[in-house]
Amino acid sequence: MVHILLVEDDPQVGELVKRFLEKEGLAVDWARTGKEALARAFEGAKPDLVVLDRGLPDMEGLEVLKALRDLDPLLPVLLLTGRADEDSRVEGLLEGADDYLGKPFSLKELLARIKALLRRAGKEGRRRFGPLELDLEARKAYLEGKPLKLSPTELNLLFALAQMPGRVYTREELLERVWGGEFEGSERVVDAYVRLLRKKLKDDPHAPRFIETVVGVGYRFLGE
């Protein structure tokens, strides 16, 4: 799974971007300050790409960029900024940003730029779990080398479960991630789609390879 470190102090922008990218199958770690971002980058799992707001409350975004470059000179960094002038864009690129996106921005354009940077870095988003392979970039799944015929909802559910292997997702969380916050149906729709997924994955619920039921809670994807 591709891991994105989002560094954004605006709660509305941060929440919007995080939800959007997660629905696209990306794992997002959201930091609200420069110090928090550096702590996560240096002490936790290294991200595959950083989306970095230049205007942070505790330190200049370019300071964070420089520290990230010291950590990994090849780490892709997409700089977000409300400064539209050419000098600011050039300064950010000269300091080591790989791309630059001005605010306000389109979420679809942000995703396209992220995918382009991941392609360039050779991190397009393929992930393998034994005989199962997920291609997040092309939005396809393969079992034993053969493409799985999944509906868009089945695919979104599979990607959501596989986002963090070992983590237990409640039915409510999966409804939010896959069907959206405005869905008014029963949580049992999750159970129905898990059954469909298991059938196509040839997954035995009593001896699961991929999706495990956590009684009274929800579901967990088995993997790394």
Image (cartoon, rainbow, N blue to C red):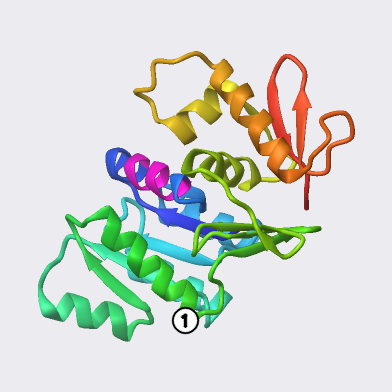
Q: Is residue 181 left or right of residue 39?
A: left
Q: Residue at x 54, y 21 (%)?
A: 189
Note whether residue 54 is visible.
no
Mark 1, residues whose alpha carbon is within 10 Å: few (<14), some, or many (≥20)? few
Q: Is residue 90 left or right of residue 57?
A: left
Q: Which residue is mark 1?
A: 120
Q: Amino acid at mark 1?
A: Arg
- Between 221 and 204, the residue placed more toward the observer is 204
Q: Secondary structure at mark 1?
A: helix
The residue furthest bottom is: 94
Can you say whether 120 is above or below 11 in the image? below
Note whether residue 25 is visible.
yes
Q: Position of residue 198 (x, y in %)?
A: 72, 36
Q: Quadrant of residue 213?
A: top right
Q: Position of residue 164 (x, y in %)?
A: 65, 45
The number of callouts visible is: 1
Q: Residue at x 77, y 61 (%)?
A: 144
Q: Residue at x 20, y 77 (%)?
A: 89
In the image, the segment drawn in magenta is 15-22
Can you say whether 153 is above or below 185 in the image? below
Quadrant location of the N terminus in the rendered image:
bottom right
The residue furthest right is: 207
- Between 70 and 148, the residue placed more toward the observer is 148
Q: Residue at x 49, y 38 (%)?
A: 153
- Between 126 and 61, the residue placed more toward the observer is 126
Q: Quadrant of residue 44?
A: bottom right
What's the magenta bit mostly, secondary-structure-wise? Answer: helix
**The magenta stretch spans residue 29:** no
